[in-house]
Image (cartoon, helix red, strand yellow):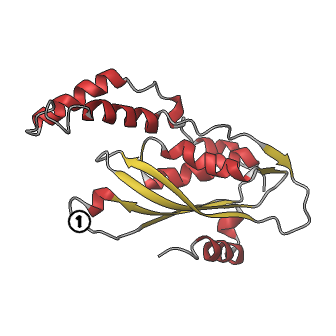
Amino acid sequence: MPADTTALAAILRPAPRDRRPVDTARVTNLVRQLLDAIGEDPDREGLVDTPSRVARWWAEFLDHDAGSVDTVFSHMTDADGLVLLRGIEAWSLCEHHLLPFRLNVSIAYLPHAKVLGLSKLVRQLRAHTHGLQLQERITNQVAAAIAKAAGTDDVAVYAEGEHLCMSMRGVEAGGVRTITSCRLGRTASDPDLAARIERLATATWH
């Protein structure tokens, strides 16, 4: 079915690339202060270049350009129309602890009047992971962004995440996976279709 753009707008937000650029000089200075505050000598061998390296990494990650996410094609197929990409790996940063989490993502949709280039599905994911995020938010935002771009509500996104904020701190639950999903349109209302997509989307998960 065609996308409900009013409903989608409620969960979309500006992609990370719309932020102001990282101030690498300021980050470099702050990392030096951090090293000193945790009892390290930022001028010792092994750490002298660490502040600038960390600053460059933040800039590379947060200022990442996912590229064009707008390429679409006319929908000309007599097949059942299901498009599904499985096993897309992505990294993001937990906004609560600034620690990384890794995602294994599957994206599915039923084209209505147009088809997205396959690389655009991946780019939509990248556009929402390169920032301070939550897995739940990423899942919802990617589904909404694809629904808006493809002009259809029939979109499903499944994400399996491993969070270092759980693995290396707190309960230290290494190997635990967090599962999130967002199903829109027929991918939620049609039980047979929903089961088919979930089976395909999660087939390679641990």
Q: How many marks?
A: 1
Looking at the picture, how far across and down is residue 74, in whole percent? 88, 48
Considering the image in quadrants, where does the N terminus appear? Answer: bottom right
Looking at the picture, how far across and down is residue 155, in whole percent? 67, 58
Could you tell me which secondary element the residue under label 1 belongs to? loop
**Mark 1 nearby-residue class (10 Å; few <14, some 14–19, many ≥20):** few
Judge from the rendering whether residue 199 lies leftward or rightward of residue 139; answer left or right. Answer: right
Picture residue at 32% right of the left edge, 36% below the top:
54
Judge from the rendering whether residue 52 lies leftward or rightward of residue 197; answer left or right. Answer: left
- Seen from the viewer's position, the closer of residues 110 and 52 is 52
Task: Relative to 118, say whether 190 is above or below.
Answer: below
Judge from the rendering whether residue 165 lies leftward or rightward of residue 61; answer left or right. Answer: left
Picture residue at 45% right of the left edge, 35% below the top:
60
Instruction: Name the residue at the left extreme.
Output: 39
Looking at the picture, how far across and down is residue 124, in whole percent? 62, 46
Looking at the picture, how far across and down is residue 14, in whole percent? 54, 35
Judge from the rendering whether residue 126 lies leftward or rightward of residue 44; answer left or right. Answer: right
- The residue under label 1 is which amino acid type? Glu
Instruction: Name the residue at the front extreme.
Output: 45
Task: Relative to 175, say whether 76 is above or below.
Answer: above
Image quadrant assignment for residue 112: bottom right
Picture residue at 68% right of the left edge, 66% below the top:
187
Picture residue at 37% right of the left edge, 23% below the top:
23
Q: Which residue is mark 1?
A: 172
Whether residue 11 is visible: no
Whether residue 50 is visible: yes
Task: Relative to 13, say whether 19 is above or below.
Answer: above
